[in-house]
Image (cartoon, rainbow, N blue to C red):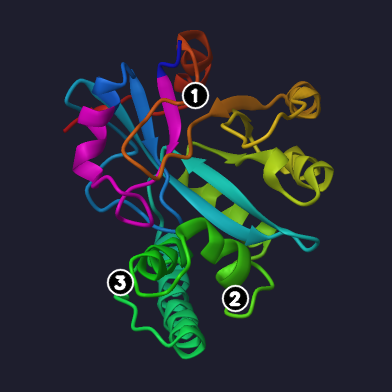
Amino acid sequence: MVRADLHVHTTVSDGELKPEAVPPAARQAGLEAVAITDHDRLQPGLDAPVVRRDGVTVVHGIELRVDAGRQRVDLLGYGLDPTPDLEAACGRIQRDRVERARAIVDCVEDRLGVALDVEFHPGVGRPHVARAIADSDADLGYQETFETLIGDGDPCFVSREIPDFETGRRLLDEAAAFVGLAHPLRYREPEHALGLTAELDAVELAYPYDRDVDLRPVRRAIDRHGLLATGGSDAHGRRLGVTGLDADAFARVRKRLPHPAIG
C-alpha cells in the first residue's frame, strides 16, 4: 500500500492543487507523507524542511532541471532549507521561464491565429500554454499540442536556460537533506542518466511510467551506489498516491529527513 507520495506538483508550478490543498488530498488518499516538488520553485508556505499539516507529513522539495551534457535531467531535492544561492538560482530560472512562455505564446498565436489566455507568472511552463491552446478556438487538444506544436523540436518550441548538472547538484546538496534523480527511465538515454546517480543520494524507483519498464537497471544503481529509493506519482492533478512508497520504504527515507515541525 502506498503511504508516501514524494513527487507532487502544485499551482506554484504547473499543478492543479494549491499547496494548502495538498495535505487534505494526501489524507484522502490514505497517505502518511507527501513531498511538494514543484518545478524550479521553492515553497514560501513551508517554513521548515519538513512540517506536519492536517495530520500529514509534508516535505519541502523541488524538481530542478539541469543540463547533464548529453541530455537534460531532473533532480529532486528533499527536506529543503533554502540557501541564498538556491533562492537566487530559482529566481533566475523563473525569469527565464516567463520570457520563454511569452515567446512560445507569441509563436502559437501567430501560427494558429488565436488569442491565448496565459498568465505570465513565476512557475509558468508549457503545460499552462497547452491548456490555453486546448481552451482556445484552435483545433488542438492538450496532448496533441505537445506532440505537434510546443514539444521539443516542434515549430513553437523554445529552449530555456538551466544550470549544468554539477551546479544544480551543488545547489541542492547545500540546501537539501538529500538529492535524487527523478524518473530515470523517462530519459532518452536512461543508462547515461543512471550513471549520474554515482554523484547523488537517491533515485526514483517507484514512478507511473506510461509503458512497461524494466526496473532492474534502477535497482542495480541503488545497490551499486548505496542509494535511497524514492517514489511518487508526479501528480499534476488532484489525485495523489497513484504511485509511491510503502511504509517500510518511507521509513528508510524518513531517517534522512529532519524531524517535522508542527505548522
Disc assigned to residue 157: 2
How far is the residue under mark 1 from the one under mark 2? 32 Å
How far is the residue under mark 3 from the one under mark 2? 19 Å
Query: Where residue 89 sits: x, y (%)?
Result: 47, 67
Give the class, few, some or many, for how many residues have Cα within 10 Å of label 3's Cα (few <14, many ≥20): some
Q: Is residue 204 above or below residue 148?
A: above
Q: Nearer the viewer, residue 86 or 222?
A: 222
Residue at left 42%, top 74%? 138
Q: Nearer the viewer, residue 243 or 71?
A: 243
Extent of the magenta region: 4-25
Disc assigned to residue 244: 1
Query: Tag 2 or tag 1, which sits nearer the N-term?
Result: 2
- Residue occupied by mark 3: 121
Residue at left 41%, top 25%? 241
Query: Where residue 245 sits: x, y (%)?
Result: 50, 19
How far is the residue under mark 3 from the one under mark 1? 30 Å
Q: State which quadrant residue 88 falls in.
A: bottom left
